[in-house]
Image (cartoon, grey):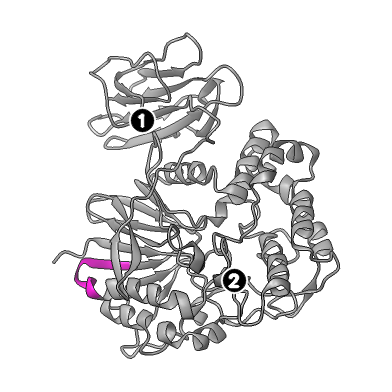
């Protein structure tokens, strides 16, 4: 049997089972074991298991609690991490083909930590030191796997602060731990409360409408921390014990991360576009909106056919009018009162086709079954917006000449999320993305390439708003409004948005 499947699992959030941990082995362990049993039973067709971040949890602890070491979590959960535990059994069944990618709640995990998971065949989980793990299939399909926190302002590794790489999101989670520790009754855990693990039981969506004005005023980080202080009741000067033994407070966090917003704006090019994209990164943390925008941008930049995320605790399959294939595998730590409709999900990737499926674990008649899950689509825009992007591909797979960009591509309207590449070689197909900025104009752009011998090709593309028509020119082309249903050769889809253009050389 061909080994052409990759199983992706993330956001389990296993801790030491203290009451404030989202994952409680008394409730969650049978579901996780069922997923690992699925891997073991189907090992003949699975080429790899990818643990896509937040398998361990070092954040969901009260401020007066020193976060555990990895070995403490391993020892507290022997049925999963022990020498005969389910993860070790899966590791053996896959002959060591298990890869670990960090998330935010476990960004401190290293290869040395993973080596503490014992295995009778001496297999070790392979640690990926990069934030994005790439796999290329035998037929050249490139797949990107990343937890997703790198795209979010509050939970990406902060390499500029004095607590590097710890992000400000750690303090948000510890403040919530403070609130829960003060409200849980004896014998109760957060798994007994509705809304926990999805991801924190606090509705942050009310801040979304204020993000733009807060970025303009420069007060976004402080405003979020003030909101968390108010909602959780944590005093600003409450000592929070960090893993290294230091103590910091919420007041300290305001100072430590005071430059975070400006740092993100600069990293995204500064100016209006930098502010706009930084706003998207903040909203991606607050509500999950725009995480697919960053996923698509990253996949296009890396020429990946598929990108797989976790982090949001919201399973998704595909992007509405997307330019790449996308899946979010969901999470494994919903609270007991929320199951159903919340569920335990993971992703299965077919490496031959780059197609994905989301599966779930359900409990039926005291047994745990793996069944398909109908995950919804995600979107690169908010529910209140429309997309007038130009999604442009230039297919040079049959071309005989290298194309070289002669000058920076123009954008009369809109901005390049992904710019046209400097060079397109024979045999290549490239993609780029011009998205509309807030306003009334849609998108309009142009890229001029020279061929060997001096001939010039000018690729024009436009997706305007209002009564104006979509347009494109420069070579033979096909157009579409969804990237799936294409028109006839050189026939323009004059209305509808977004606008997909495939130039063929």
Image quadrant for the N terminus? bottom left
Mark 2, secondary structure of its residue: helix
Furthest residue toward right: 237
Left or right: 104 as drawn, with respect to 482: right
Residue tagged 1: 393
Mark 2 or 1: the one toward you: 2
Q: Nearer the viewer, residue 225 or 491?
A: 225
Circles 2 and 1, Cβ within 8 Å, touching? The answer is no
* Numbered range of the magenta stretch: 41-48
Mark 1, secondary structure of its residue: strand
Q: Is residue 177 visible?
A: yes
Distance Cα–Cα, label 2 vs label 1:
48 Å
Image quadrant for the C terminus? top left
Q: Nearer the viewer, residue 265 or 310?
A: 310
Residue tagged 2: 190
Instruction: Examine the rendered structure and indicate whether residue 310 appears above or below residue 261.
Output: below
Question: Quarter of the image holding residue 35?
Answer: bottom left
Where does the image place residue 90, in percent across and percent down from the top left? Answer: 32, 78
Q: Is residue 420 visible?
A: no
Q: Earlier in the sequence, mark 2 or mark 1?
A: 2
Query: Which residue occupies 58% across, 67% down?
Result: 193
Of the numbered discs in the image, which one, if any, rests on residue 105?
none
């Amino acid at each position: 049997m061909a080994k052409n499947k990759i199983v992706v699992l993330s956001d389990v959030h296993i801790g030491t089972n203290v009451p404030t941990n989202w994952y409680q082995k008394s409730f969650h362990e049978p579901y996780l074991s069922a997923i690992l049993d699925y891997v073991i039973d189907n090992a003949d067709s699975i080429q790899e298991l990818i643990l896509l971040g937040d398998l361990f949890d070092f954040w969901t602890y009260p401020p007066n609690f020193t976060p555990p070491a990895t070995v403490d979590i391993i020892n507290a959960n022997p049925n999963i991490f022990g020498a005969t535990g389910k993860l070790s059994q899966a590791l053996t069944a896959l002959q060591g083909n298990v890869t670990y990618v960090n998330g935010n709640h476990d960004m401190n995990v290293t290869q040395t930590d993973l080596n503490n998971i014992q295995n009778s065949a001496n297999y070790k989980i392979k640690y990926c030191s990069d934030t994005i793990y790439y796999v290329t299939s035998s037929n050249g399909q490139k797949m990107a796997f990343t937890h997703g926190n790198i795209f979010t302002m509050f939970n990406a590794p902060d390499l500029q602060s004095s607590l590097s790489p710890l992000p400000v999101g750690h303090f948000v989670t510890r403040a919530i731990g403070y609130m829960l520790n003060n409200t849980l009754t004896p014998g109760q855990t957060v798994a007994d409360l509705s809304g926990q693990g999805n991801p924190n039981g606090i509705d942050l969506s009310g801040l979304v409408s204020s993000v733009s004005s807060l970025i303009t005023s420069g007060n976004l980080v402080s405003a979020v921390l003030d909101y968390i202080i108010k909602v959780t009741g944590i005093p600003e000067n409450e000592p929070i014990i960090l893993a290294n033994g230091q103590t910091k407070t919420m007041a300290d966090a305001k100072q430590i991360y005071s430059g975070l917003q400006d740092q993100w704006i600069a990293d995204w090019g500064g100016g209006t576009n930098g502010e706009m994209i930084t706003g998207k990164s903040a909203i991606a943390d607050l509500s999950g909106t725009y995480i697919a925008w960053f996923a698509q941008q990253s996949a296009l930049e890396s020429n990946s056919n598929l990108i797989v995320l976790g982090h949001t605790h919201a399973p998704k399959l595909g992007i509405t009018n997307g330019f790449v294939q996308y899946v979010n595998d969901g999470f494994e730590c919903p609270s007991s009162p929320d199951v159903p409709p919340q569920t335990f999900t993971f992703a299965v990737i077919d490496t031959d086709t780059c197609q994905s499926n989301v599966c779930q674990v359900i409990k039926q008649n005291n047994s745990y079954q793996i069944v398909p899950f109908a995950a919804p689509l995600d979107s690169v825009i908010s529910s209140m917006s429309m997309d007038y992007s130009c999604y442009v591909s230039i297919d040079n797979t049959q071309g005989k000449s290298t194309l070289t960009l002669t000058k920076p591509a123009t954008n009369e309207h809109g901005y390049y999320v992904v710019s046209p590449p400097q060079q397109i070689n024979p045999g290549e197909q490239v993609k780029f993305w011009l998205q509309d900025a807030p306003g009334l104009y849609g998108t309009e752009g142009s890229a001029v390439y020279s061929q060997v011998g001096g001939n010039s090709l000018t690729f024009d593309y436009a997706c305007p708003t209002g009564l104006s028509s979509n347009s494109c020119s420069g070579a033979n082309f096909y157009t579409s409004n969804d990237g799936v249903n294409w028109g006839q050769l050189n026939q323009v889809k004059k209305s509808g948005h977004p606008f997909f253009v495939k130039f063929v050389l």
